[in-house]
Image: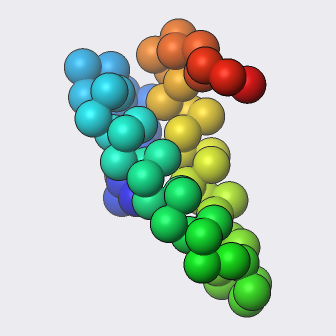
């Protein structure tokens, strides 16, 4: 997960960051969100992915 994702995010990093975030999200989903903390982690990852996609005008494929 990206620690400090702010409005001045550099979209030049979007490809690598999104790849990493999607991999991390998949790992967490595979483990299952059995606790409140795990669910919050999933939500943060999904929010970061959406933030980067929106900020950098990236339209996710297959959704």
Residue 10 visible to an observer of this rendering: no
From this view, report whether residue 41 is shown above or below residue 14: below
Identify the residue at image location x=54%, y=57%. 25
Q: Position of residue 7 (x, y in %)?
A: 45, 30
Q: Quadrant of the C terminus?
A: top right
Residue 12 horizontal/vertical position (percent): 24, 20
Which quadrant holds residue 18?
Answer: top left
Residue at image coords 60%, 78%: 31
Looking at the picture, how far across and down is residue 34, in whole percent? 75, 86
Please tell me which residue is depicted at 68% across the width and 59% down the height of the picture: 43
Q: Is 32 or 42 nearer to us in this picture?
A: 32
Please state the total of marks drawn on the protein image: 0
Residue 32 sits in which quadrant? bottom right
Residue 19 visible? The answer is yes
Give the colour scheme shown: rainbow
Q: Tell me if 51 is positioned left or right of 37 in this view.
A: left
Residue 37 drawn at (x, y percent): 66, 83
20, above or below 8, in the image = below
In this rendering, position of residue 40 left or right of residue 17: right
For image coordinates 54% across by 58% down, the residue present is 26
In the picture, measured across the screen, residue 24 lies left or right of residue 41, that is left
> Where does the N terminus fall, quadrant-wise?
bottom left
């Amino acid at each position: 997960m990206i620690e400090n994702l702010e409005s001045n995010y550099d979209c030049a990093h979007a490809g690598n960051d999104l790849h990493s975030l999607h991999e991390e999200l998949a790992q967490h989903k595979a483990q299952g969100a059995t606790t409140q903390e795990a669910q919050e982690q999933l939500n943060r990852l999904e929010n970061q992915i959406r933030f980067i996609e929106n900020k950098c005008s990236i339209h996710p494929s297959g959704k």
